[in-house]
Amino acid sequence: MTASARAGRTAAADELCSGAYEKAGGPDTGVALVAVGGYGRSELAPYSDLDVVLVHDEDVDLGPLAEQLWYPIWDAGLRLDHAVRSLPEMVAAADADHRVASGLLDVRHVAGDPHLTLRLRTTMLASWRRGARERLPEIRRASDARHRLMGELAHLSVPDVKEAEGGLRDATTLRGLVATWLVDVPHTELERSRQTLLDVRDVVHEAAGRATDRITPETWPVLAEVLGLAGDRAAQVHVREAGRRITHLSRLAWRRVDGVLARPASARTARRPVLERLGPGVALSAGEVVLDGRADPAADPLLLLRAATVAAERGVVLAPPTAARLVREGAPLPDPWPEEARQLLVRLLASGRGLLEVWETLEETGALAGFLPEWERVRMLPHASVIHRFTVDRHVVETCIEASALIRSVRRPDVLMVAALLHDIGKGGLTEHSVAGEPIARAVATRMGFDEECVELVALLVRWHLLLAETATTRDPDDPATVEILTSRLRTPEALALLRALTEADAKATAPKAWTSWRAGLVADLARRAHAALDTGATLPAFPVGEVAVPAGLTAASVAISVEPVADGSRVTAIALDRVGLLSDLAATFALLRLPIRAARLWAQDDHSVSVWEVGSDTVDAAVLRTRYEAVVDGRVDPAARFARAHPADGLAPTVVVRPEASEHATVLEVRAADRPGVVHLVCAELARLDVAVRSAHVDTLGPQAVDVFYLQEPSAGALSETRAAETAHAVRAALS
């Protein structure tokens, strides 16, 4: 699928349209059939519409020409998007809608009067340039709205090669910006990326057998085969690189548009560009960081980092030609780096939102390879989990941006920022990424000139960057073994503070749902307990377990329920006569009402059982809960039948594992399964059948996967024996399967 194939399709369409025009008796003067949009650019995909306009001079009577013209094209089986307008109507339509005006920039003659087509094209270009300053802000707003709706091509799991940010629509917009004569865009880079996406769209059309711009997961192998690429990963990198390059060029172009619009329109009243010196060898010109006349890249190995840092800190553009020149002519950094180089990198990483565009420029110009060759491991690497909204490399940059807001909370912000940069550097291989990333992070930190203590701290944070979040959301904070999980690995309050900040930054960069108030509260509570243990050896109480007032008159089929609002949800306290299966029935009640359970704790009080449930909804009605619970207990509702219809979405078998290291007082059972209603109920029902007591349950959802952890004891108290624990795990696995 190449440009020649598109040209062939266009030529065939031209022949059909011009033949239809001639057959319909179209005149040679005063009327023209023109192609616009993608057809005008001679870029027809296999299932593209033909966008055509029959344009005529105002004093020409078309008669039945239009009706006679379209039917042969329809009869040929082609999809036609057509219009009939006079030349003044074309001008008025373009003035009223920037999308029409943009489409008419690519007007191409097909049949009829070529002089009319030339007049139309000349008029459209002149109007486009004349009204550019007024029209560009509207185009910018429309593009931004589309980006928010469609997402970014480089990071979407199912990217749209036309409408997503960095897609063909943006490439066309860039061509329109160039046509205003106000800004320029690197033509070779834009055209290479645009042709790449056009080739991809051709394959997508052929694979789908219809007009579509979305690359579904099953299309990646087809793309790889047709385009001669080495597998799915290579196909994804091929497409996402093109999208990212167009995104980068687009952001750069709009920055330049902003600069142009901020300056006076008259060249006579505009001042000449001023070169403002920002540091040794670095200056600001027209809103972009460039080299000053005294810069000597070959003699200053810090020049690239200095230019990038001042650009990011000021929120301005690092001029791509400047970065490219520094790549070609710049001196390499010594090994290890001098302290100033390391400080510049830390300042760059901590510059906040200004980091993103500067980092993109460094990547697009090949500058990253000079000081961080390990970046190639994660460049354009898709995340395995669908919860992530970005590819691994962009996620890392977003983590640095989030971490920059937390540097006041730690004693070593330099260690935090470098750990944020390297926390996912081990991804892309077969080894668990935090394990694989530790030695890489150690080597990079050593090269950067950190002392031995800081090198080990960076490596430690990379190795255990998931530890705090996973432990806080899946382990019982009341169990001393939970705090021991952290303190045995982190050893110092400083390491714990850094890990807490990195955990928050990593989660916020992942997705909004990855850092809710509830999750943040769990992490903060566990970090507080671990800090106390590391600092003073104290054990802090967390959950209020004690005497509660038991309502009189409770029967075996009734329950007392109270609801308390908490961060991101509700806390439900249930009191009932203790019995086998009580927890299962309560879990079924929540599941039947589609209330997501986050955690549950329970304890005995005389003949009663008290359970406290954290649920992820702030609209919990105690009366509705009681009614549904009574229906479950009375047998009027069969939860097993309801949940049997909720099949796992991923088709994967559940895993059920005993974690003997997680507690000395209970048997910890970890269940991972597709997220679906009733998982907690099914587990609790099976445990009740086995006469196994549940002390607490901790429920978490990571994308499509539920991760549920149950602390189990024998009814007479005490952990399960090894044999009994294995039998329980097997039974729960079978129940979920």
Image (cartoon, rainbow, N blue to C red):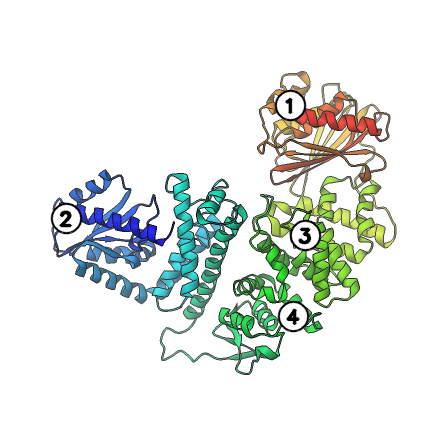
Q: Give how far apart the Cα atoms at labels 3 and 1 are.
A: 40 Å
Mark 2 and mark 3 lie on one chain; the one further toward the N terminus is 2
- Visible residue check, residue 550: no
Q: Disc 2 marks which amino acid?
A: Glu
What residue do we see at 71% from left, 42% from top? 473
Instruction: Identify the residue under disc 2.
Output: 22
Foreground label between 4 and 2: 2
Q: Position of residue 85 (x, y in %)?
A: 21, 52
Q: Counting other residues with Cα less than 10 Å from the Cα at mark 4, is it few (<14), some (14-19), or many (20 or more)?
A: some
What is the C-alpha distance between the residues marked 1 and 2? Answer: 77 Å
The residue singled out by tag 1 in the image is 627
Residue 37 seen in render: yes
Disc 1 crowd rating (10 Å Cα; few below 14, some 14-19, many 20+) is: few
Three-letter code for the amino acid on which mark 4 is drawn: Leu
Q: Which callout, 3 or 1, points at the residue further toward the start of the chain? A: 3
Of the image marks 4 and 1, the number of the one nearer the N terminus: 4
Q: Secondary structure at mark 2?
A: helix
The residue indicated by pointer 4 is: 344
The residue labelled by disc 3 is 504
> Comparing marks 3 and 1, which lies closer to the viewer?
3
Q: Position of residue 164 (x, y in %)?
A: 45, 50
Residue 445 lies, in percent from the top left, at: 71, 63
Which residue type carries mark 3? Glu
- In the picture, residue 258 is in which quadrant? bottom left
**Circle 3: element type:** helix
Element marked by disc 1:
helix
* View extreme (right): residue: 537
Indicate the quadrant where residue 264 lies.
Answer: bottom left
Q: Is residue 636 above or below residue 31?
A: above
